[in-house]
Image (cartoon, rainbow, N blue to C red):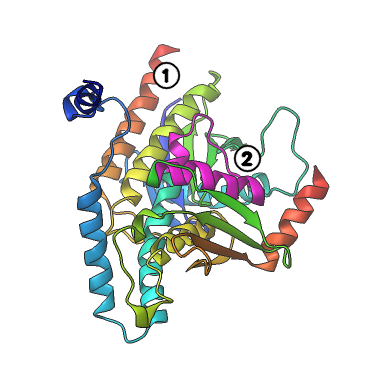
């Protein structure tokens, strides 16, 4: 009885109509489109690094266009100037808009103050992609890295972003964000002003 | 306060869009000068290293009145991508309210964001979109409505 009740609660008819809330994109449609993007890019490159670059370039277009749309949806729009605040904005707001969840962790590298890592335990872009053994360094989250890079570069934070899977946890993807020195210098100056 | 000219300026300070309310008018060239002169003031306000004035958030998009001239008042707005919007309005005796200006700029920003999301538009190109043009026309109309209310 209980199982039946539970099953009934899971049907589509019991869910509230989501017309008022956020409009979610069908996952299979999305996965299909993304797989086509990867196949298209894969057929036009000769090396893995070129494939990464191509995916990232596509992401940059998306990332740059996200900036104005996202800022307009804010209640009190502002031009963020501080580095850490801006990264938190990416981790929370940008990620929520793109994937309906926050990114799992944001860390600063211990060795260098210009490098940050954003961790995503199960990136939706990699969920349906099985990487061949001979191309183990391929990570299709390069597309998401491109989005981050486009977003940051568009908002005056010059940087390079790279995506790679962690060695001990292959399902987790880390995005390495390397800022240019000028950005770090500017942030320190802003720190001293306040 | 009727708006007479709308301009969009790119991050590298070249014009993306400039339109005045009646394009055949001889004063058209004058608007280019006005807008060009306003870039310096925008740059000054956007620069984050200056000491922020009390009661003003330096991160706000709306930059307020940039400078008044004899006939016109020039208002500015800067987006996160450092694309600037400039609005030239007629200099009348009636006080123009900031909330109204903010609303005009907000509409302009929405139109710009819509236009930017078109995948066939490359950021940094001249704006030729018809939808954007219509939005600007409605902004001219709307600003006229503000005068009649006062």
Which numbered marker is on residue B147?
A: 1
Q: Position of residue A59 (x, y in %)?
A: 38, 62
Q: Position of residue A175 (x, y in %)?
A: 52, 62
The Cα–Cα distance between marks 2 and 1, rounded to whole angstroms, is 30 Å
Residue holding disc 2: B59
Q: Is residue A88 magenta?
A: yes
Residue at 38% x, 15% y: name it.
Answer: B148
Mark 2, secondary structure of its residue: loop
Vertical placement of residue A172 versus B86, above or below:
below
Segment tinted magenta in the rendering: A70-98
Q: Is residue B21 magenta?
A: no
Q: Main secondary structure of the magenta part?
A: helix
Vertical placement of residue A193 versus B93, above or below:
below
Chain under numbered label 1: B
Task: Say if residue A186 shows up in the picture.
Answer: yes
Mark 1, secondary structure of its residue: helix
Viewer-proximal residue among A117 and A89: A117
């Amino acid at each position: 009885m209980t199982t039946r009740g539970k099953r009934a609660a899971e049907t589509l008819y019991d869910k509230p109509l989501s017309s008022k809330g956020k409009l979610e994109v069908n996952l299979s449609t999305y996965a299909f489109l993304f797989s086509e993007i990867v196949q298209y890019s894969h057929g036009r490159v000769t090396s893995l690094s070129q494939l990464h670059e191509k995916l990232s370039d596509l992401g940059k277009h998306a990332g740059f266009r996200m900036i104005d749309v996202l800022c307009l949806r804010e209640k009190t729009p502002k031009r963020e100037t501080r580095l850490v605040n801006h990264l938190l904005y990416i981790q929370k707001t940008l990620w929520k808009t793109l994937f309906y969840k926050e990114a799992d962790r944001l860390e600063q590298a211990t060795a260098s103050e210009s490098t940050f890592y954003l961790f995503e335990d199960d990136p939706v872009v990699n969920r349906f992609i099985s990487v061949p053994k001979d191309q183990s360094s391929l990570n299709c989250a390069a597309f998401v890295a491109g989005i981050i890079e486009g977003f940051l570069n568009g908002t005056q934070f010059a940087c390079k972003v790279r995506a790679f899977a962690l060695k001990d946890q292959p399902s987790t993807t880390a995005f390495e964000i390397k800022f240019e020195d000028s950005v770090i210098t500017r942030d320190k100056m802003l720190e001293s002003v306040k | 306060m009727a708006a007479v000219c709308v301009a969009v300026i790119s991050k590298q300070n070249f014009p993306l869009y400039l339109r005045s309310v009646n394009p055949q008018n001889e004063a058209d060239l004058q608007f280019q000068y006005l807008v060009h002169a306003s870039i310096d003031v925008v740059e000054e306000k956007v620069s984050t290293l200056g000491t922020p004035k009390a009661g003003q958030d330096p991160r706000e998009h709306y930059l307020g009145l940039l400078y008044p001239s004899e006939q016109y008042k020039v208002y500015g707005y800067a987006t996160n991508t450092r694309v600037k919007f400039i609005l030239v309005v007629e200099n009348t005796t009636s006080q123009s309210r900031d909330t109204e200006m903010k609303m005009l700029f907000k509409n302009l920003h929405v139109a710009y964001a819509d236009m930017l999301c078109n995948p066939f538009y490359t950021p940094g190109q001249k704006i030729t979109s018809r939808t954007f043009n219509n939005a600007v026309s409605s902004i001219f109309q709307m600003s006229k409505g503000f005068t009649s209310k006062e």
